[in-house]
Image (tube, rainbow, N blue to C red):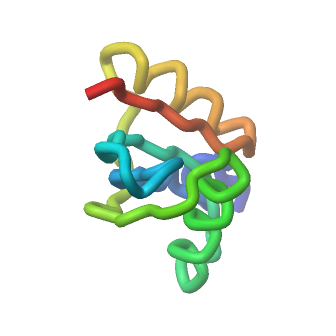
Amino acid sequence: MSSAPSESKPVQLIVADVWKNKEEEPRQVHLLLMTDDTDNLVSVALQILANEGYDEAELLEIGTLTEEPDEEPHLSAYKNALTGQAALIEFNE
């Protein structure tokens, strides 16, 4: 009858290339969030990225994390997502 929150709302992982300025090279980000509204997941992800100052985003992959990551920075981001907050990992490549 009772289930853990992580079972009812899985952590979603979204990989995207993002731009703050279109003339610049894209930066890759990983966005982790917990939601049961998968129908609007793309819209939610794009809104979060826009709120972080990204003018444009190309979503590359969307998936579900089925277990806790072993290494940082994904481990901390995963734990943050379990609290209901979105976690954004920015890569400098």
| Quarter of the C terminus within the rendering | top left
At a point 44% along the width and 62% down the height, the residue shown is: 57
How many circles with numbers are drawn on the protein?
0
Q: Residue furthest top?
A: 72
Left or right? Give the position of 6 relative to 51. left
At a point 59% along the width and 54% down the height, the residue shown is: 49
Image: 37 above or below 55: below
At a point 55% along the width and 85% down the height, the residue shown is: 39
| Quarter of the N terminus within the rendering | bottom right
Image: 26 above or below 62: above
Q: Nearer the viewer, residue 17 or 4?
A: 17
Q: Nearer the viewer, residue 59 or 84?
A: 59
Left or right? Give the position of 49 relative to 24. right
At a point 67% along the width and 65% down the height, the residue shown is: 47
Q: Where residue 36 sits in the image (x, y, percent)?
A: 62, 70
Left or right? Give the position of 39 relative to 66. right
Q: Residue furthest bottom?
A: 39
Q: Where residue 50 sits in the image (x, y, percent)?
A: 65, 58
Q: Nearer the viewer, residue 64 or 61?
A: 61
Q: Nearer the viewer, residue 72 or 30?
A: 30
Image: 15 above or below 83: below
Q: Where residue 80 sits in the image (x, y, percent)?
A: 64, 30
Image: 93 above or below 36: above
